[in-house]
């Protein structure tokens, strides 16, 4: 009986998996064409400095308008891009489009803030630093207009090579931040060795603050750690005024989240930045 049940389950799963792998295959072939068909775009989510309420920068978030489907979340397609190697060309597109946008906004006289691009571990290759520096130069964008968000897992899996590349990027004047901080299995010792400027407290720890005692304690501890290491600390996923008040009182430098603004299309972000800085 157990065996029959086992077989039944087996058949059920393999049908489901067939369906899933077909969808994955289709997703992959659609994604392969996304760059050339101009289906990718960038959204910008402002980051607010709590000291003076100014917009100190924005995180650049990739969007894919998939034909016949509509907007697809990067949480869905970035993993596929990583598995298939498409992340190389997509990542290149993101850096290029970001620098092009920064140059256009600077030429238009917009306040000069910094833009933070997410990097994927799979994107790290020996020529990445030079490729990024070349793109900055091509658009005449200064290195300190760019920030790169990396994750703990990237560092932990990373070899000495990754550290050297990060050092190169940092030395060139590009800001580096550690995204989703606290979710990885980090040995905190590397924080001292790395050219990191900013810690980003992961959204999962901001959730439920201030009622959630554990998360409140974790957020406070990360802020303390950042202060002691003289790093800037930003909280992501801030949705309520209560979270904001707690973080501000705890000494957090910056916030990012729906409370202030969702990620915005380029023109809306530009309008907000202009309005906010008068
Ligand atoms: P992330 O880097 O941690 O980005 C923050 C995510 O939290 C974004 O999701 C943002 O829209 C969302 N978020 C911001 N504020 C709030 C809030 O107050 N509440 C809630 N519930 N969510 C908030 P998004 O845009 O869907 O991106 C998901 C992830 O996809 C990113 O997480 C990042 O890991 C990855 N990603 C996005 N763009 C790129 C890219 O250009 N390259 C790479 N490699 N990864 C990217
Ligand atoms: Mg990020
Ligand atoms: Mg994040
Ligand atoms: Mg996160």
Image: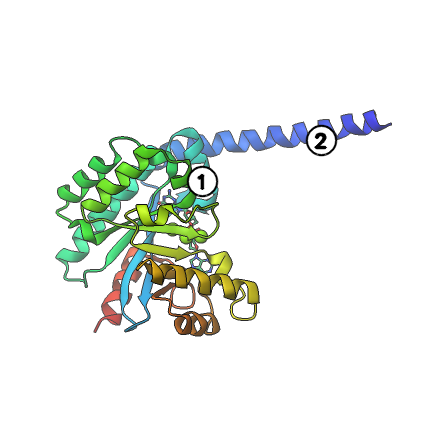
Q: CA distance from mark 1 to mark 2?
A: 26 Å
Of helix, strand and loop, which one carries label 1?
A: helix
Where does the N terminus fall, quadrant-wise?
top right
Return the residue at label 1: 77
Residue 220 % position (x, y):
45, 65
The answer to whether 139 appears left or right of 234 in the picture is left
Residue placed at 71% from the left, 31% from the top?
A: 12
- Mark 1 neighbour density, 10 Å: few (under 14) some (14–19) many (20 or more): some
Question: Pointer 2: what residue?
Answer: 12
Q: Is residue 268 left or right of residue 235?
A: left
Q: Position of residue 52 (x, y in %)?
A: 28, 73
Q: Where is residue 21, by image quadrant?
A: top right
Vertical order, 42 against 125 (above or below): below
Check mark 1 vs ligand 1: CB closer than 8 Å? yes or no: no
Q: Earlier in the sequence, mark 1 or mark 2?
A: 2
Tags 1 and 2 in contact by the CB under 8 Å rule? no
Secondary structure under the numbered disc 2 in the rendered image = helix
Q: Is residue 32 above or below residue 65?
A: above
- Local packing at callout 2 (Cα closer than 10 Å; few below 14, some 14-19, many 20+) is few
Query: Considering depth in this image, is 75 or 18 the residue closer to the camera?
Result: 75
Residue at 24% across, 31% down: 127
Say which quarter of the image contains residue 94: top left
Residue 68 x/y as whole percent: 46, 41
Pick the residue in front: 92 or 243. Answer: 243
* Left or right position of 52 against 61: left
Residue 200 shows which numbered tag?
none
Q: Is residue 89 visible?
A: no
- Above or below, comparing residue 268 to residue 191 in the picture: below
């Amino acid at each position: 009986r157990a065996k029959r049940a086992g077989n039944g389950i087996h058949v059920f799963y393999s049908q489901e998996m067939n369906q899933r792998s077909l969808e994955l295959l289709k997703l992959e072939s659609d994604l392969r064409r996304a760059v050339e068909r101009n289906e990718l775009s960038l959204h910008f989510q402002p980051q607010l400095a709590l000291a003076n309420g100014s917009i100190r920068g924005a995180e650049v978030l990739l969007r894919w308008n998939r034909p016949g489907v509509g907007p697809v979340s990067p949480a869905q397609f970035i993993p596929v891009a990583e598995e298939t190697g498409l992340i190389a060309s997509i990542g290149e597109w993101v850096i290029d489009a970001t620098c092009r946008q920064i140059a256009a906004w600077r030429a238009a006289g917009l306040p000069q803030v910094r833009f933070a691009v997410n990097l994927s571990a799979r994107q790290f290759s020996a020529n990445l630093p030079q490729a990024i520096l070349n793109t900055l130069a091509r658009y005449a964008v200064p290195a300190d207009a760019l920030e790169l968000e990396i994750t703990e897992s990237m560092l932990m899996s990373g070899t000495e090579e990754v550290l050297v590349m990060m050092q190169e990027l940092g030395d060139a004047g590009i800001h580096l931040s550690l995204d989703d901080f606290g979710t990885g299995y980090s040995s905190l010792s590397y924080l001292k060795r790395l050219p990191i400027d900013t810690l980003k407290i992961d959204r999962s720890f901001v959730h439920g603050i201030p009622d959630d005692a554990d998360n409140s304690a974790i957020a406070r501890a990360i802020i303390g750690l950042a202060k002691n290491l003289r790093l800037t600390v930003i909280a992501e996923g801030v949705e309520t005024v209560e979270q904001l008040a707690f973080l501000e009182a705890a000494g957090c430098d910056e916030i990012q989240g729906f409370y202030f603004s969702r990620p915005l299309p380029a023109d809306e972000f530009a309008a907000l930045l202009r309005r906010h800085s008068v």
